Image: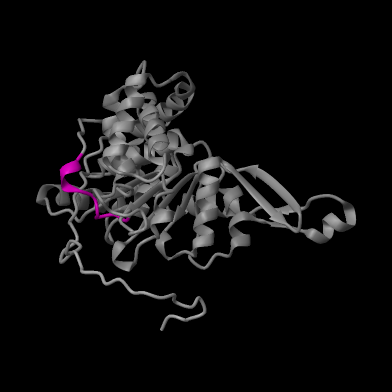
Amino acid sequence: MNAATNARSGAAQRPAFPFAALIGQTALQQALLLAAIDPGIGGVLVSGPRGTAKSTAARALAELLPEGQLVNLPLGASEDRLIGTLDIETVLRDRSVRFSPGLLAKAHRGVLYVDEVNLLPDALVDALLDAAASGVNTVERDGVSHSHEASFVLIGTMNPEEGELRPQLIDRFGLMVQLQNCFEPRVREQIVKARLAFDLDPAGFRAGHAQQQAQYVQRIRAAREALPQLSFDDAVHAHVSTLCIDAAVDGLRADLVMLRAARALAAWELADAVTTQHVDRVAEAVLVHRRREQGESSTSGSSAPGRQAESRNLPSGPVEPSLQNAGSGEGDWGYLPPQAAATTRVKGVIPLDVKKR
């Protein structure tokens, strides 16, 4: 029995909580659906405390995709296990490439789930994000290379209390959703009741959501087919540029991701065109981990979550599912503006070989 069979067997033994039954996670559901429609968006980073349904949502999304496969990347995985290996001896002896696939190959057309992605080595995160954005995995060893398709939805989760990703890496995730603990009594009751019902009778609970699940599958398929027919007019481009400039983002990645996410949302709704309203409804998930405050240096690490300006919250409207998380943040407490200081002119030449002490 191979690994894929084991994965399917494990999924059959442990049914997934239905995506349609998730409660109070509209922003997360929207981000995951957009990435499922267009994996080239570059993956979804989900930040939040323990017990906020991060892994449950990832498993639920995998069930809606063509392969229905969820591949987990364990924390202790090596680079070879992730990207695969090349048998160099076979190349030298038979002049043929012998490739042993890794987890990226197994995740093709499915979901690659990385729990605690902030604890992975940077090299692994780089490889993940490269493949997620390009849809191709390339393995190179001693001048020999092999490439294969690796189109998957990358979902990385992290608990910010356990450490942050470097800004250079966090920026490469297409979308980000910040989850919070739920302190709304009625919502908590609904979530707990749904979970208890699922645990008591998984088959019966899933049967009650089978029709909605089928609709999700059909709409994802239809949205993927509609995606190439949608284009952007000048008004959409101008609006995206304005939002990204106002957020003081580094580079143009935010612009490109925002356009792709807006197009995916338009395709999900089977709209005739991408509009500025679609842009507004995806903008926060694109900018929440990229936004910098006015005057901040791009090397200050301010791209990390929680540093966005309160005055730059973006508009959002009712969506199915909708994006409701609004950005908020704090300034630099205790920061003092630079003060003028007197200078003294010194005559003479300082030798170049004098070392600083």
User: Is residue 192 toward the left or the right of residue 275 in the image?
Assistant: left
- Count every numbered label the image shows and give the total: 0
Location of the N terminus (image quadrant): bottom right
Query: Is 28 drawn above or below residue 260 in the view shown?
Result: below
Q: Residue furthest right?
A: 93
What residue is drawn where x is 30% and y is 35%?
282
> Quick one: 54 or 125, which is closer to the camera?
125
User: Is residue 86 toward the left or the right of residue 39 in the image?
Assistant: right
Q: Position of residue 176 (x, y in %)?
A: 34, 47
Quadrant assignment, res 313: top left
Q: Which residues are magenta?
A: 304-313
Q: Residue furthest bottom?
A: 357
Q: How is the image coloured?
A: one colour
Quadrant assignment, res 123: bottom right
What residue is drawn where x is 58% and y is 65%?
78
Location of the C terminus (image quadrant): bottom left
Q: Is residue 292 visible?
A: yes
User: Is residue 90 toward the left or the right of residue 225 in the image?
Assistant: right
What residue is drawn where x is 57% and y is 55%?
6
What residue is drawn where x is 29% and y is 24%?
276
Residue 311 counted in the magenta span: yes
> Quick one: 291 or 99, which is closer to the camera?
291
Query: Is 202 drawn above or below residue 224 in the view shown?
Result: below
Q: Is residue 16 visible?
A: no
> Quick one: 178 or 208, which is closer to the camera?
178
Query: Is 28 drawn above or below residue 48 in the view shown?
Result: above
Q: Position of residue 98 (x, y in %)?
A: 77, 53
Residue 179 counted in the magenta span: no
- Give the overall secondary structure of the magenta segment: loop
